Image: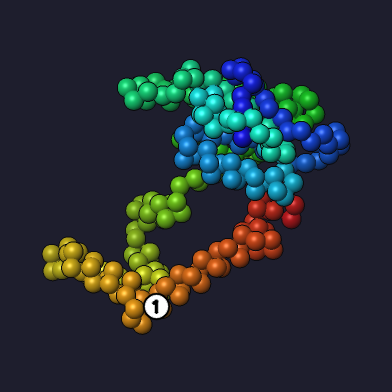
Amino acid sequence: MIKPINNSITCLTSHPEKPSMVDLRRRPRFLLIAFPVQGHINPSLHFAKRLISIGAHVTFVTALSAHCRVFIGGSTPVARLSLAPFSDGYDDGVKPDVNMEHYMSEISCCGSKHLSDLILSGAGAGQPFTGLVSTIFMPWAMEVADELQIPSALLWVQLATLFDLFYYFFNGYGDLMTNSEDVWETGLRVKANEEGIVEKDEIKRCLELLMGDGEIGEEIRRNAEKWKALGREAAMEGGSSYKNIKAFLGDD
């Protein structure tokens, strides 16, 4: 964790590693901006560490209020991670009675200028950013990247399940239920009554089958463990997720 030095909106905490200027120019450099709430910052920092682990430099950006809550203690910074917080006008945090429409307008205005300054100063110093990654709720970050002609990407910080729900809500959800039971074999389809309502006894029946000691429950749990192991394997070096993130960095 890193203790903020002061409340300057241009405060930039750099890592102790001192690579050559040639290395700095060749290494992929990403701006990673997170909406200033814990549920966005934690997964963003995990993603930053993932990028760093395979050779990138990351400049992490969030509002000063969140920065001061998260980066405390004064331990050694992560190598190749820089911090560039900015003031959104709410340095003491957003209170419950704040007008959110006004707040979103302020963070958009202040954040856009800050990102623009960072991108332009990096380019001027001969260390241009390779790309920008932003969490949700900040479309203006993508607009800044667009205007300054650097690639941008959205970091989805919510559960993949929720992403699925959004997708199927807008596109129909029939395949989701079919896949869970017939393809992935990790779920059971509930049955609605004549009025189209799923009653509590039906939910109870499915839960008992899933959690019970019978053959159906055991098979579903085995399949869940199988997909869990495959997911971990994909994230390991050489796995599909690993290859995708390498491709994202432009190494493949």
Above or below, 21 against 65 in this view is below
Q: Is residue 136 visible?
A: no
Q: Position of residue 131 (x, y in %)?
A: 66, 38
Q: Which residue is mark 1?
A: 218
Residue at coordinates 49% horizontally, 19% vertically from top-left? Answer: 91
Residue at coordinates 86% horizontally, 35% vertically from top-left? Answer: 20
- In the rendered image, which quarter is residue 2 located in? top right
Say what secondary structure mark 1 lies in: helix
The furthest residue to the left:
195
Q: Is residue 114 left or right of residue 120?
A: left
Q: Give the residue type that dot 1 points to.
A: Glu
Number of marks? 1
Q: Position of residue 5 (x, y in %)?
A: 64, 21
**Quadrant, the N terminus:** top right
Above or below, 217 against 148 in this view is below
Residue at coordinates 53% horizontally, 35% vertically from top-left? Answer: 34
Badge 1: how crowded within 10 Å, few (<14), some, or many (20+)? some
Comparing 234 with 101, the one in front is: 234
- In the rendered image, which quarter is residue 150 located in? top right
Residue at coordinates 64% horizontally, 30% vertically from top-left? Answer: 74
- In the rendered image, which quarter is residue 47 located in? top right
Q: Is residue 91 left or right of residue 202?
A: right
**Quadrant, the C terminus:** bottom right
Q: Is residue 177 left or right of residue 83?
A: left
Q: Is residue 250 left or right of residue 189?
A: right
